[in-house]
Amino acid sequence: MKSVWRLGRPAKEADAPDTETHWDVDEWPQDVAGWSTGAQANTATVIRWMAWGLLVLGPLLGVFAYLSPPALSGPSQKTPPPAAPAAVGAQGAAGFAQLFVAAFISAGEGDQDELAAYYPAATSLRLEGDSGRRRGEQLTVVRLRETDRGVWSVTVAARITDTQPVVDGRPDRTAAAQAAAAQSMRYFQAAIATATTADGASGYTALAMPAEVSAPERITTPGLIYGPMRPALPADPRTQAVTEFLTAYLTGAGELDRYLAPGTKLAPVAPAPYTGVAVDTLAIEGEKGTEPVTTVPADGTVLRLLVAMRATGHDEVRVPLTYALTLKARGGRWEIASLDGAPTPAMPAASTAPSTGAGGTATSAAPTSAATTAP
């Protein structure tokens, strides 16, 4: 209990001599554990409202915390831009090398600045002969590999036509001489460096003048999943299916969709380049025997085959063509499920075996190397 003591007098003795001091006691409301009963009631009310507020805000705060992104500790860092795929640099280096080799073949006296657009050090070269005396035709990349980070070795094939052939020390401009020169296929290897420029694009430059090299080596033809080629018998349902399909596909005769399996989308070649087709032989997946086939298996059966045929052009000349097709059985007939991009090999071709590259240097085939076909 708290008491306050005050100095005063009794009222009835106000006029009496001040001979004795009296003390009055004011008693405050009783306290409980250090809190008055009024303060305790107020505190209980506040706590009760706070509890209700937490009950209401709790679910809302939980949802907000779940949807908010987590804060990153430490200073913020910029996300580096994604690196360009190697294929993009390879494609650009290949095109740059083709242009460089074309300019190199036709370069002559006074063409240093033209070559310097590809190889800056070409300004100090000594060039001889007339400008444009030779011309590169049918330029194409036949080999491409990355020799170091950002450095591509590109082999370009070109037929070179000499516009001023020399016979016995004198120019020979006869058509026969030019035709003979055009039969020469030559190969040039260019080293191209690539990097990202200030504006984020890819830039290229040659590291040296082209080097003339030997033709790329042929590889052994891989085995295929198909059996041996055998005559396409007219009574064979597979012969009938591919003949009808190829006729509509190449000559425009008939409706192509009627020969396609559900879900297969193909458009005929337009304008139609041929007037007729003849299927000569078939190679069937997994087939080794030569017994004639006259029936169609159960619906859903899938079969891959290779079709060797001849197509007759508008000039009545027959051209040999080969198609890899996938057939699917439905309703007692074969339908074309897909026109395959290439015959299917029996086993994947090795990609890491050492080989001899153009110029005789032993290399390992890179995953980005382009397929090569020697003429």
Image: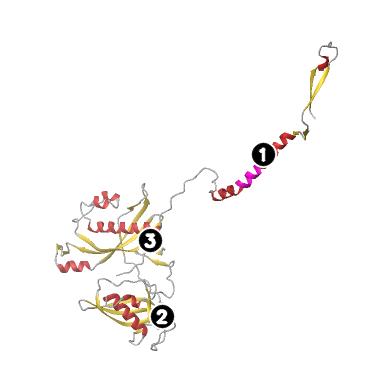
Tell me if residue 332 comes above or below residue 66 in the rendering. Answer: below
Which of disc 1 and disc 2 is earlier in sequence? 1
Residue bearing mark 1: 46
- Whole-percent x, y for residue 220 in the image: 38, 73
Nearer the observer: mark 3 or 2; the answer is 2
Compute the Cα span from label 2 to label 1: 81 Å
* In the image, farthest residue toward the right: 19
Image height of 143 relative to 28, above or below:
below
Residue name at image x 22 percent, y 58 percent? 106
List x then y, in percent, for residue 186.
Answer: 27, 65
Q: Give the amino acid type for the residue marked by disc 2 in the picture.
A: Ala
Residue at the extreme front of the image, as rendered: 12
- 279 vs 226, left or right, is left
- Disc 1 or disc 3, which is closer to the eye? 1
Q: Quadrant of residue 153?
A: bottom left
Residue 312: horizontal and vertical position, in percent?
Answer: 24, 78
Residue 63 in magenta?
A: no
- How far apart are the two marked residues, 1 and 3, measured between alpha carbons? 78 Å
Label whose residue precedes the other's in the sequence (3 or 2): 3
**Tag count:** 3
